[in-house]
Image (cartoon, helix red, strand yellow):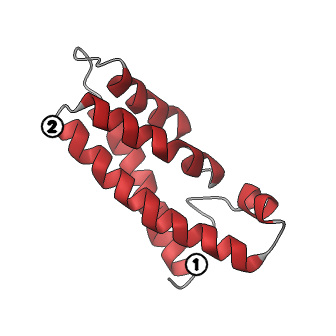
Amino acid sequence: MEQHYKLFRVRELADNDDDFVKTLAETFLEEVSEDAERLKKAVAENNYQEAYQAAHKMKPTVDLFELGILQDLIEVQDWGKFAKTDIDITEKLNIVITAVNKALVEIKSDFKL
């Protein structure tokens, strides 16, 4: 439990209400998985605006669950925001997607979702 994510800030936000913590975990599974797919597609298509929006939407949740990739996600976000056509963002995207996928699997298992 909590190998690829941390619940400290989630529990703090939820005031240690286990039902609310589970609700936040469910929201993570729904929202972040969709946004990660959206982000992958946007980067593959060089859709800078969509990449920016997806990454920007993911930031608070990724930060709350402390995936340890916030700076990488910000770099992907800025790639989209500033249409950095001269930069290959694939490596940073892969770091983000790998961490998100590991957290998704672990959260599903930990919360039996």
Q: Is residue 49 above or below residue 113?
A: above
Position of residue 42 measured from the top left corner of the image (x, y, whole percent): 24, 40
Chain-order first, disc 1 or disc 2: 2
Q: Residues within 10 Å of mark 1 (few under 14, many from 20)?
A: few
Is residue 46 toward the left or the right of residue 93 in the image?
left
Q: Residue furthest left?
A: 45
Question: Are there few (<14), some (14-19), or many (20+) residues within 10 Å of tag 2?
Answer: few
- Whether residue 100 sits left or right of residue 67 in the image: it is left
Looking at the rendered image, the quarter that the N terminus falls into is bottom right
Residue lying furthest right in this view? 15
Q: At which x and y percent is residue 8?
A: 76, 59
Is 82 displayed left or right of 12 in the figure? left
- Please say if 94 is above or below 2: above
Q: Which residue is mark 2?
A: 45
Picture residue at 58% right of the left edge, 78% below the top: 110
Give the residue drawn at x 39%, y 60%: 33
Q: Which mark is residue 47?
A: none
Q: Amino acid at mark 1?
A: Asp
Secondary-structure class at tag 1: helix
Q: Residue at position x 84%, y 66% from top?
A: 15
The amino acid type, in three-letter code, at marker 2 is Glu
| Residue at mark 1 to residue at mark 2: CA–CA distance | 34 Å
Q: Which mark is residue 110?
A: 1
Q: Nearer the viewer, mark 1 or mark 2?
A: 2
Q: Position of residue 30 (x, y in %)?
A: 44, 67
Query: Is 67 drawn above or below residue 101 in the view shown?
Result: above
Name the secondary structure under disc 2: loop
Say which of 28 and 72 sits in front: 28
Q: Is residue 35 left or right of residue 6?
A: left
Whole-percent x and y of residue 67? 56, 51
